């Protein structure tokens, strides 16, 4: 019996001459949210399809919930929950009917199925819409139902393949919350995503996948730390730029600061921010705005592959984490409220790569895209 | 973000789902889907009845030809053909639905669930069989209301219903085989006229002995003619075991052959 819920060794899948997955090693621990991050076509979904027994590996081995995905596929299916890339839901059936069907397919008794169905509908906020045909659901509702369907049998291992692709920011945020809640209850989760912020916000560990191989693996913070120091940008009162630059030079090398601003690479990391502010205060420099840009996962991806993650988004929904010495935190803590102001889209098109790691001070900026 | 790591207790695996509840649930889904999609069932109801009306109007006087089976109405002669047309038009939905499930990913959801693979096949087929049987009752009722008759009475109706159910299973299985192989609704529909060809080359619409020539030869060796003749005997003459066995037997053979074909196609799909 395996000691970890998801493990793969040298996993390969070839489609003719195309090596979609080319030797992936994975080890996902109990209670972990593990993210596979990569662009479209990187091989993430193929890995998930092999781990969920939907695709036979060309090479290598994998065990899920302690069972070999090839030789013990039926046992794997009984232990896992799966929500695949496209919320595959029969539009002619109602949400309630689909949950009933799913419970029968998982061999759940009628009384328990009813109880579980109602509980899940409540949890994903679809109780009122449960009697409506799924064809009338919005994309977010479908995704939430998809998640509920994958949870009907209370799986210990859950696979989510791009769970928020196509969702509006509010729905994305709601789904993130649900994923976190599941994880809090001990469910081991492997999710794939092409959204940098999603991986950053949800996953305890991530593997960056590109062209069928894992190019980096580790905790998001550690991966970013490997790339370099965060950039601190300040806006100060007119005429104080030189003083500010002089003070800042004690904490790191100067970087491009933008109009009316000064910037440094904060060599000591975000923890040094309070010290910087105190130093500026000591020199009577009046700080108007503070912004701390951590190295992003996109930087990690770029460093590993020489390319940026195209189409990636900073995912507007994560409540910004205020930097030390910040202004009123409440002003920027409502990622949801910001969504309605027209500044944020869902990141599908035309988004430049972003890191999702901006920390803003003084509550004035809100989250932005580069 | 990540819960505290605890020693894993090992897999906690629920028992496997038996094939019967899974099959029943999938058959139910198939019927519910059909009922809610008029585009799938209206043609199967409307066109056969329309053709029956047109053919009866055009050919009713042919019942007086020497050698034509003795019937009060051409509708009586046409009842088996009308029924088979309806079944063919409707049961193909099984293959279309399989292709749609494959295209939109619902099939993956089914594959990822712990059900015996045979339920994937039997669920849809059971749906096709049940709907075909319902059609048989419906068509017989409508045609009888317009002057047709079933000489063998309830026993004859039972043979009609059973034959329709088995034939619907065969047509459904064939369309599913194409669906599993191709995953394309268009291709399922492209293959669908094959069954119509067999019906048109049979005794369905006119007695072959009156047509003569190559048509008579082809129609006499066409198993569809045997099935239709078996049904027609129950409808026109009255109860006869041989006719009943012939109709049910041919429909059963078609069903068995096509279910085998669909099972092979499913297996091939699962090996991908």
Image: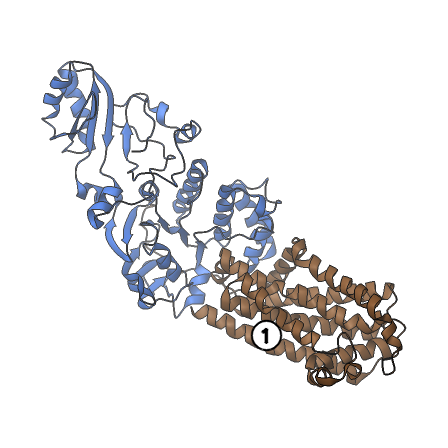
Q: In this view, does A217 lie above or below A236?
A: below
Number of dots carrying numbers: 1
Q: Which chain carries label 1?
A: B
Quarter of the image where one finds residue B210: bottom right
Colour mode of the rendering: by chain
Residue plotted at (86% across, 64% down): B146
Of residues B166 and A126, the one nearer the viewer is B166
Give the chain coloured blue: A
Image quarter of the N terminus of chain A: bottom left
The reply to whether residue A106 is visible in this rendering is no
Whole-percent x, y for residue B140 in the image: 81, 67
Residue plotted at (36% across, 37% down): A315
Q: In this view, does A252 lie above or below A208?
A: above
Of residues B219 and A106, the one nearer the viewer is B219
| Residue, far front | B213
Q: Is residue A306 above or below residue A232?
A: below
Query: For this view, does A268 lie left or right of residue B20?
Result: left
Residue under label 1:
B259
Q: Callout 1: helix, strand or loop?
A: helix
Of the chain colours in the picture, the one used for chain B is brown
């Amino acid at each position: 019996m395996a000691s970890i819920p998801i493990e793969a060794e040298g996993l390969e899948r070839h489609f003719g001459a195309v090596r979609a997955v080319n030797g992936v090693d994975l080890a996902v621990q109990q209670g972990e949210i593990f993210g596979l991050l990569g662009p479209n076509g990187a091989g993430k979904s193929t890995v998930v399809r092999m781990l969920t027994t939907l695709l036979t590996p060309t090479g290598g081995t994998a065990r899920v919930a302690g069972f070999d995905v090839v030789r013990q596929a039926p046992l794997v299916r009984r232990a896992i929950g799966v929500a695949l890339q496209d919320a595959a839901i029969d539009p002619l059936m109602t949400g309630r009917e689909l949950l009933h069907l799913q419970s029968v397919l998982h061999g759940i008794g009628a009384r328990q199925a009813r109880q579980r169905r109602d509980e899940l509908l409540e949890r994903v906020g679809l109780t009122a819409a449960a009697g409506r045909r799924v064809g009338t659901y919005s994309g977010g509702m479908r995704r939430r139902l998809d998640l509920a369907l994958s949870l009907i049998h209370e799986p210990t291992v859950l696979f989510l393949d791009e769970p928020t692709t196509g969702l509006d920011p509010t729905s994305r945020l709601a789904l993130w919350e649900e994923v976190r809640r599941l994880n809090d209850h001990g469910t081991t989760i492997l999710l794939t995503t092409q959204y940098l912020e999603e991986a950053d916000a949800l996953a305890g560990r991530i593997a960056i996948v590109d062209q069928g191989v894992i190019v980096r693996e580790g905790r998001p913070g550690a991966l970013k730390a490997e790339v370099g120091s965060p950039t601190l940008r300040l806006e100060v009162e007119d005429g104080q730029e030189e003083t500010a630059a002089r003070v800042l030079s004690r904490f790191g090398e100067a970087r491009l600061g933008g109009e009316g601003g000064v910037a440094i690479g904060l060599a000591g990391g975000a923890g040094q921010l309070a010290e910087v502010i105190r130093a500026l205060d000591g020199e009577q420099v009046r700080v108007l705005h503070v912004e701390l840009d951590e190295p992003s996962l996109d930087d990690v991806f770029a460093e590993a592959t020489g390319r940026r993650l195209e189409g990636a988004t900073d995912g507007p929904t994560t409540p910004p984490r205020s930097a030390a010495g910040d202004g009123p935190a409440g002003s920027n803590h409502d990622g949801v409220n910001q969504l309605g102001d027209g500044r944020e889209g869902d990141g599908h098109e035309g988004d430049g790569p972003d890191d999702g790691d901006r920390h803003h001070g003084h509550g004035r900026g809100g989250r932005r895209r580069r | 973000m990540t819960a505290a790591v605890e020693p894993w207790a090992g897999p906690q695996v629920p028992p496997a789902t038996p094939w019967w509840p899974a099959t029943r649930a999938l058959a139910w889904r198939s019927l519910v889907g059909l009922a809610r999609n008029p585009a799938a069932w209206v043609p199967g109801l409307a066109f056969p009845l329309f053709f029956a009306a047109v053919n009866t109007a055009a050919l009713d006087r042919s019942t007086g030809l020497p050698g034509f089976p003795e019937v009060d109405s051409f509708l009586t002669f046409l009842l088996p053909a009308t029924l088979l047309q309806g079944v063919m038009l409707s049961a193909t939905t099984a293959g279309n639905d399989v292709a749609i499930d494959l295209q939109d990913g619902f099939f993956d959801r089914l594959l990822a669930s712990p059900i015996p693979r045979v339920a994937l096949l039997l669920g849809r087929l059971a749906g096709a069989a049940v709907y075909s049987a319902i059609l048989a009752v419906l068509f017989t009722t409508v045609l009888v209301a317009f002057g047709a008759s079933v000489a063998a009475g309830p026993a004859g109706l039972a043979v009609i219903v059973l034959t329709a159910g088995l034939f619907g299973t065969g047509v459904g299985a064939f369309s599913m085989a194409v669906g599993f192989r191709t995953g394309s609704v268009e291709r399922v529909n492209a293959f669908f006229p094959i069954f119509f060809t067999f019906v048109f080359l049979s005794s369905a619409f006119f007695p072959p002995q009156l047509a003569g020539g190559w048509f008579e030869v082809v129609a006499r060796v066409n198993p569809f003619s045997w099935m239709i003749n078996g049904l027609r005997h129950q409808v026109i003459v009255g109860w006869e075991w041989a006719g009943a066995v012939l109709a049910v037997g041919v429909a059963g053979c078609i069903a068995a052959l096509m279910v085998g074909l669909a099972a092979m196609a499913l297996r091939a799909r699962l090996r991908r």
